[in-house]
């Protein structure tokens, strides 16, 4: 379970532990890049103003950071969960990284993806990759009032995975860029359905 931009593992861990089914192994990785304001980031925007973070396409340098973070995540997974099925997920930038893991060989082990308040990074490449993989399951949640990642960008994630044949559980809430407390149990129940 991966944190978002300006977050860190200590901010994500309490939520991740709360939704974790009994007997599962939890990995809460930490992004490698420092954010200029606070916390960490999975990729560094060339400019951190609000318009830049809403850009539909990442720059070449930003994508290099994404790939570097993917290598880091691949290493962490191989060290802490070398075998067995995986459910990967995250909030905001962390949710984008969870989708990006589908590009790696580890994707064959991924049975579910949790995307909360997030967007697509490489939609065309991801669409092609999903065609090569077996359909799995996604838990998707996004806030109507999200100003950091507009809900339209979030819906693009859900639609792309649905088009790839995935079963997608959808929760659209009335709040903003957050993981509302009242939906934590819904995520846990979805995870428990894998047992």
Image: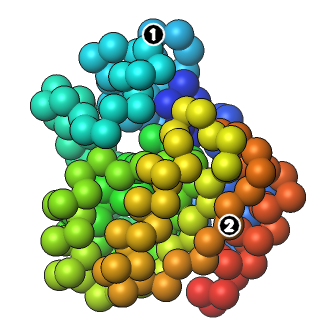
- Quote the CA–CA distance across marks 1 and 2: 32 Å
Q: Quadrant of residue 172?
A: bottom right
At a point 20% along the width and 37% down the height, the residue shown is 63
Residue 73 shows up from this direction: yes
Q: Is residue 42 above or below residue 104?
A: above
Q: Is residue 192 left or right of residue 106?
A: right
Q: Is residue 164 left or right of residue 13?
A: left
Of residues 187 and 75, the one nearer the viewer is 187
At a point 29% along the width and 66% down the height, the residue shown is 102
Label 2, residues with CA under 10 Å away: few <14, some 14-19, many ≥20:
some
First reached walking from the N terminus: tag 1 or tag 2: 1
Of residues 109 and 175, the one nearer the viewer is 175
Residue that carries the numbered disc 1 in the rendered image:
36
Of residues 131 and 69, the one nearer the viewer is 131
Image coords of residue 103 (percent x, y): 22, 63
* Tally of marks: 2
Residue that carries the numbered disc 2 in the rendered image:
171
| Proximity of marks 1 and 2: CB atoms separated by less than 8 Å | no
């Amino acid at each position: 379970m991966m944190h978002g931009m300006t977050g860190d593992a200590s901010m994500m861990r309490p939520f991740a532990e709360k939704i974790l089914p009994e007997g599962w192994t939890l990995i809460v990785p930490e992004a490698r890049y420092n954010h200029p304001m606070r916390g960490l980031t999975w990729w560094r925007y060339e400019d951190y103003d609000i318009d830049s973070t809403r850009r539909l396409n990442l720059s070449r340098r930003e994508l290099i950071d994404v790939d570097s973070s993917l290598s880091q995540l691949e290493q962490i997974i191989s060290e802490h969960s070398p075998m067995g099925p995986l459910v990967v997920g995250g909030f905001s930038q962390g949710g984008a990284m969870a989708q990006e893991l589908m590009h790696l060989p580890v994707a064959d082990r991924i049975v579910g993806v949790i995307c909360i308040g997030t967007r697509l990074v490489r939609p065309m490449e991801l669409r092609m990759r999903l065609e090569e993989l077996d359909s799995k399951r996604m838990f998707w949640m996004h806030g109507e009032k999200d100003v950091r990642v507009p809900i339209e960008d979030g819906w693009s994630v859900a639609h792309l995975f649905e088009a790839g044949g995935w079963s997608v559980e959808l929760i659209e809430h009335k709040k903003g860029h957050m993981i509302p407390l009242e939906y934590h149990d819904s995520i846990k129940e979805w995870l428990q359905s894998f047992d």
